[in-house]
Image (cartoon, rainbow, N blue to C red):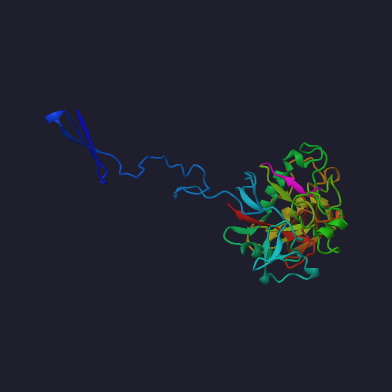
């Protein structure tokens, strides 16, 4: 039997098979040399956000650097969103970091600066409501100033995590209150946590020490909280109050406060009455008490250090709302602290802000 094989570049082999005069020529089609035609399943969409995929791929669900994902809250109607991990710091428009967000007592020129969620430098304060909103939207598509409901979604999530409580269960002991003793350690100033000793705001430096700048190593001055998804957020209840957008349009609010200006329990009648009377300076609608109060209704500031509400007396117009407390224990800081004091055009030395990126 004789067997002859000849190969052609067309990808066809000619096979001559036979014994003597009975030989015959058979052609067999095979893939061209050097070409792999193995069929491989297209798994490019099995891990969205890591490359590959066609037009049917889901939208990316990861957050930008130094932003954390806050889980959706069905009672508030919020979807998953990305919240700044740190209180906003200032940078020049070319990206050069500005470490004194207080600017030695003079508001920064917003046209020359942009906000950045980063650990080092003291928070950007002395900024108005409309300026804070504009600075956040300047970061790009889907960025905006944290709204009342978004800030509350983060606070309620923090409340629900046992490790954020001194008793290691929800409602047991006190909830972490953060930097709230009106002091900065000498080493903090040296290490760059604070630029000015006259403004008691702290940066997080390299974000490795949750007690950094407080002069403590344990206790309720811890500056970090853990969310239910394991994300870590800095300085929500203390350090600087945080300006929030009441209705997504960065407008002020009008309300009728109690007989006397002062601090009141967030689950007390004074805040409830104030919220009921509240309207926006433009646009319709108002706010709900549930957007300011803890889910655990037995909590109070005296026992659990959740913060109190500062409300001006009588009829007030065009006020901004800030959430969380500031560095002074005299201002009743805490996770559910809220302030209705400042005018929307005010530039407080203790009020900063956080930006959000929608997913």
Residue 342, percent from left and from top: 77, 63
Q: Nearer the viewer, residue 141 or 339?
A: 141
Residue 252, percent from left and from top: 70, 63
Compared to residue 22, the image places residue 272 above or below, namely below
Instruction: Please give left or right for residue 81 compared with residue 330 in the image.
Output: left
Q: Is residue 224 magenta?
A: yes
Q: Nearer the viewer, residue 214 or 294?
A: 214
Instruction: Please give left or right for residue 143 compared with residue 263 in the image.
Output: left
Span highlighted in magenta in the image: 222-228
Q: Is residue 343 magenta?
A: no
The residue lying at 64 percent from left, 68 percent from top is 94
Q: How many marks?
A: 0
Instruction: Please give left or right for residue 312 compared with residue 136 in the image.
Output: right
The residue lying at 67 percent from left, 71 percent from top is 112
Residue 261, percent from left and from top: 84, 58
Which quadrant of the rendered structure holds the N terminus? top left
Residue 329, percent from left and from top: 86, 53
Report whether residue 329 is seen. yes
Residue 204 found in image quarter: bottom right
Residue 350 found in image quarter: bottom right
Q: Nearer the viewer, residue 264 or 157?
A: 157
Compared to residue 67, the image places residue 101 above or below, namely below
The residue lying at 68 percent from left, 45 percent from top is 231
Report whether residue 290 is seen. no
């Amino acid at each position: 039997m004789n067997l002859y094989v000849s190969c052609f570049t067309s990808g066809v082999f000619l096979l001559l098979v036979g014994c003597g005069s009975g030989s015959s020529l058979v052609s067999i089609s095979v893939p061209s040399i050097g070409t792999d035609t193995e069929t491989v399943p297209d798994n490019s969409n099995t891990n969205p956000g890591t490359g590959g995929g066609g037009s049917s791929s889901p939208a990316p669900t990861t957050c930008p650097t130094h932003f954390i994902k806050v889980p959706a809250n069905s009672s508030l109607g919020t979807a998953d969103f990305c919240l700044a991990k740190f209180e906003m710091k200032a940078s020049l428009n070319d990206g050069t970091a500005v470490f004194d967000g207080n600017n030695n007592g003079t508001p920064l020129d917003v046209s020359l600066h942009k906000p950045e969620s980063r650990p080092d430098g003291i928070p950007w304060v002395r900024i108005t409501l409309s300026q804070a909103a504009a600075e956040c939207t300047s970061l790009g598509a889907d960025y905006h100033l944290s709204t009342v409901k978004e800030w509350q979604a983060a606070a309620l999530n923090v409340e629900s995590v046992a490790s954020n409580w001194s008793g290691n269960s929800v409602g047991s002991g006190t909830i972490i209150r953060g930097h709230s003793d009106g002091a900065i350690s000498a080493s903090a100033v040296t290490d760059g946590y604070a630029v000015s000793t006259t403004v008691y705001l702290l940066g997080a430096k390299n974000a490795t020490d949750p007690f950094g700048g407080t002069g403590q190593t344990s206790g309720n001055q811890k500056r970090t909280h853990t969310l239910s998804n394991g994300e870590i957020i800095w300085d929500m209840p203390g350090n600087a109050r945080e300006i929030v957008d009441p209705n997504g349009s960065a407008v002020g609010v009008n309300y009728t406060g109690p007989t006397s200006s002062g601090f009141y329990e967030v689950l007390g009648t004074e805040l409830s009455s104030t919220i009921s009377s509240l309207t926006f300076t433009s646009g319709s609608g108002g706010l709900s008490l549930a957007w300011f109060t803890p889910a655990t209704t037995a909590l109070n500031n005296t026992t659990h250090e959740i913060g109190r509400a500062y409300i001006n007396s009588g009829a007030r117009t065009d006020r901004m709302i800030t959430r969380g407390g500031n560095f002074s224990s005299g201002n009743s800081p805490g996770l559910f602290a809220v302030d209705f004091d400042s005018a929307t055009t005010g530039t407080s030395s203790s009020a900063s802000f956080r930006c959000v990126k929608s997913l």
